Amino acid sequence: MINDQHYKIADKEISLLSLNFKEGEKIKDESIVEILAQSRKIIKKYFTNKLFLKTDQIPRGGKEYLNCDRAFDIFANHKVMPEYCFSCYKVQINPKNVIDLIKLFFLFDIMNFENENLRKSFIDFREDEKNYKGIIYCTTLEEAKKINYNVSKYLKVNLDEGIQSHVKRGCKEFAEKHPEFLNLEKDVMRYKKEWKKIENEFDANSQKIYKSGERKLVYGLSLKDVLIFQNWIDFAKIEGDESYKVLTEFYE
C-alpha cells in the first residue's frame, strides 16, 4: 500500500524540478535524461517497491470536461453523434519515438493557448492507430487551423522538423459509420435535428453519471506524470522503439 504522506512529499519534490530548456532552442535528449534521473532518485528515496499507474494519457489545460464518454455511449447504442461533437476539431501531432513524446509533454506544459485548450500526450492503442500521439482540442475549424500553424512552428524549433501535425474533425470511430463526418470544408456533415430526440431519450434513461463542468487546470511535472513516462518507455521497449535506450539511466 502506498504511503499517502510519502506520495505527497515525492510529488512536491518532483514538481520543483525544471527542464533545462530555453524558448527558441531544441529540447535536448540530455535534458530529458537528467530530469527523469532526478525524478527516479526522488521516487527511490520514498518508495522501496516499484510504483505503477494504469493510464497512458497526460492531459493539460482544458477549462471544461468534453464529455466524450457520453458521446461514445450514445454512438455505441444508436450510431449517432451528440450535437457537441460537431464542434470538435483536433490538431493531431505524431511524435516519431518515445523521447519525442516526452518532449511534447513538456512543450504542451509551457505553451499558451488563448482558450486554455485541452491537450494531451498519450499512446493510442487501437490496432490500426497504435502509435505515440499528441492532441489539441478545438471548437472551430478556424481555431484549429490557427493553432496548427503555431504548433508546427514550435515543433520545428523545439522538437524536430520531421514531426508533423494536421487538423482533423472529431473521432475516427464516428467516421466509420458516417464517412462524411471527417470532411473539413467540402460536403461538411451537419447535425441532424432528429438526433436531438435520441440524445434526450438517452439521457432520460441512462443511469450513468458523466463528468461535466469545469476542469481543474494542471501544469508542471508531477509524480503521476513520471509514472506515465515509465508506461510510455515500457511500450517503446515492447514495440521495438530503441530510442528508449537513451533513457536507460531512468529505465533500469
Image (tube, helix red, strand yellow):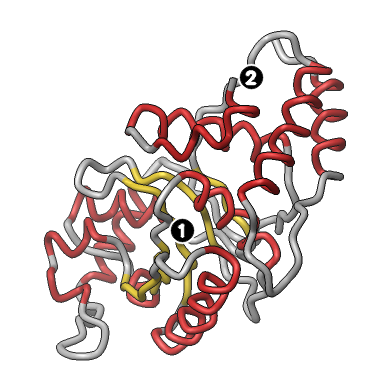
Snapshot quadrant of residue 35: top right
Q: Seen in the image, is 159 located left or right of residue 75?
A: right
Label 2: which residue?
Answer: 51
Q: Is residue 245 above or below residue 83?
A: above
Q: Is residue 90 above or below residue 244?
A: below
Q: Which of 150 and 7 is in front in this view?
A: 150
Label 1: which residue?
Answer: 134
Instruction: Give the image location of residue 138, x and y in percent.
Output: 47, 75
Mark 2 is surrounded, within 10 Å at the Cα level, by few (under 14), some (14 to 19) or many (20 or more) other residues, namely few
Q: Which SS class for mark 1?
A: strand
Q: Seen in the image, is 121 located left or right of residue 166?
A: right
Q: Seen in the image, is 193 located left or right of residue 229?
A: left
Q: In the rendered image, which quarter contains the C terminus?
A: top right
Q: In the rendered image, which quarter contains the N terminus?
A: top right
Q: Residue at horizontal 49%, vertical 61%?
A: 66
Q: Which SS class for mark 2?
A: loop
Q: Residue at horizontal 22%, vertical 41%?
A: 127
Q: Which of 126 and 139 is in front in this view?
A: 126
Mark 1 is surrounded, within 10 Å at the Cα level, by few (under 14), some (14 to 19) or many (20 or more) other residues, namely many
Q: Which of 150 and 61 is in front in this view?
A: 150
